[in-house]
Amino acid sequence: MKKYSTIFKAYDIRGVYPTEIDEKIALRIGKAFSQFLQKEKKRNLAIVIGRDNRLSSGSLIAAVKRGIKAQGDNVIDISLVTTPIVYFGVRFFKADGGIIVTASHNPKEYNGLKLVREDAIPLTDREINNLGIIALQDETPYEKDRKVLGAEHKRDILSEYIKFNLKFLDKSKIRPLKIVIDTANGVCGILVKKLAKKLNKITIYHLFSELNGEFPNHIPDPSREENLKSLQAKVLKVKADFGVAFDGDGDRIIFLDEKGKFIRGDFITALISRLILRENPGEKILYEITSTKVIKEVVQEGRGKPIECRTGTSFIHDKMRRENIFFGGEISGHYYFRENNFLETPLFVLFKIMEEISVQKIPLSKMILPLKRYVSSGVINFKIENKEDAMKKVEQYFKKKGFKISHLDGIRIEAKDFWLLVRPSNTEPLLRLSIEANNKKILNQELREVKRVLVL
């Protein structure tokens, strides 16, 4: 069982197939997940199951279902879907939990699972770790583990999911637009094809729409510049109003402006926050700690309440739910919406941008330009084995200078003309540094200081 010990991550389960994750551990995870849910309820639970279109997802989902049914629980199989559709399915069917077999944005050789409990609440890192312990302790021979006590039902909820999301689009505001959407041969292709039929004023140029688990055109990771080249070229060629890229499981959405320029996720959060607060003053808006401080300024300008949060889906979802936050965003392109049970809602963001371009009749680049008030380093990774000692050095150095220090997520230094964040990677011997400053001179100066403190 040592083979599987590295796949239980902070937010999900993921590894290379079949060397790190295979049908044997998938069956045990199915059983362990049922046992986890049964601690709170009795048997005969209903669990929604979906999958992406990776080559190994079919056999892995079959094993997960075997595990669930072996514990006496029932499976609602919604087949090929995105992660947000599984979450929607858990709520739609009033199920006790949900699993999607996916490795999100990772290359084709990876696969994994994302798990949620009742009401589509993500499992915490501690719960995933405990589930892993249960699964790894299961020594029942795979070939003999063929009990079938629970039932299985096939359901199709794609149309219901689209209908739900269209509630947040004011079609009366929409004028004819041209949009390029790249789904990278991933499962989001089926969603875009169906959605396009509902948006009759929108011309959609759909790149790599065919489902192909080999991902022959590029990896379904829109955060990497090389994966956006085809999208950029098509936006320019057809003179589109903007471009959109989804990741492999459809819970992240990335935007390009009409010039084919990448727009960072925190600027999209700032823009959407401004639009929301125009009609909903006083609402709370969440942003992760690595985001530009422009979000805080925009929210305050709109008479809203900015809420800072540490990075990570489970932390963000938990904070949004506890504090009843209207909208939240991550720099990576995850966006959370109260009306969707505080879960990722990429289509809400897409619709809001469509509406604003239609009403304002100005390019997306001009909407974003006023938000670019500062300069940023982006995320800089330093290979450091003793991350804790390195962070202490940074904290002590800036503490002597009298700057404000926060420990919400790593070490964050706040000054009048810059802020910087040093946080450890959860999975690698890396220290991640982010700096935002009033100008390049200050940014370069602080970067040199941090490197000197770390003796790099």
Image (spheres, helix red, strand yellow):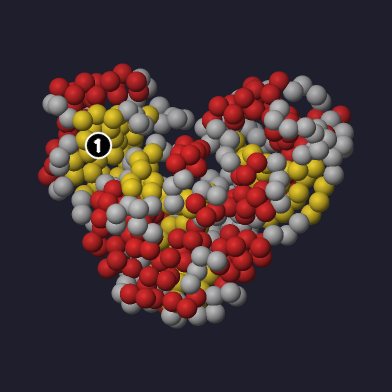
Side (left or right) of 451 relative to 122: left
Quadrant position of the C terminus in the picture:
top left
**What's under tag 1, amino acid-wise?**
Leu
384 in relation to 211, above or below? above
Q: Residue at (56%, 63%) from the top-left corner?
A: 165
- Residue at numbered disc 1: 420
Q: Quadrant of residue 109?
A: top right
Q: Residue 96: x, y in percent?
A: 70, 41
**Considering depth in this image, is 150 or 104 the residue closer to the camera?**
150
Q: Residue at (69%, 30%) from the top-left corner?
A: 40
Q: Residue 342: x, y in percent?
A: 51, 48
Q: Residue at (41%, 55%) from the top-left corner?
A: 226
Judge whether residue 422 can be spotted in this image.
Answer: yes
Q: Residue 346: x, y in percent?
A: 50, 57
**Considering depth in this image, is 169 or 447 the residue closer to the camera?**
169
Q: Residue at (35%, 53%) from the top-left corner?
A: 282
**Considering depth in this image, is 303 or 292 the residue closer to the camera?**
303
Side (left or right) of 446 relative to 22: left
Bin the neighbour count of mark 1 within 10 Å (Cα to Cα): few under 14, some 14-19, many 20 and up: many
Q: Residue 425: x, y in percent?
A: 41, 31
Toward the front, the furthest residue is 282
93 in relation to 178, above or below? above
Quadrant position of the N terminus in the picture:
top right
**Considering depth in this image, is 23 or 339 the residue closer to the camera?**
339
Side (left or right) of 450 relative to 386: left
The local secondary structure at tag 1 comes to strand
290 in relation to 326, above or below? above
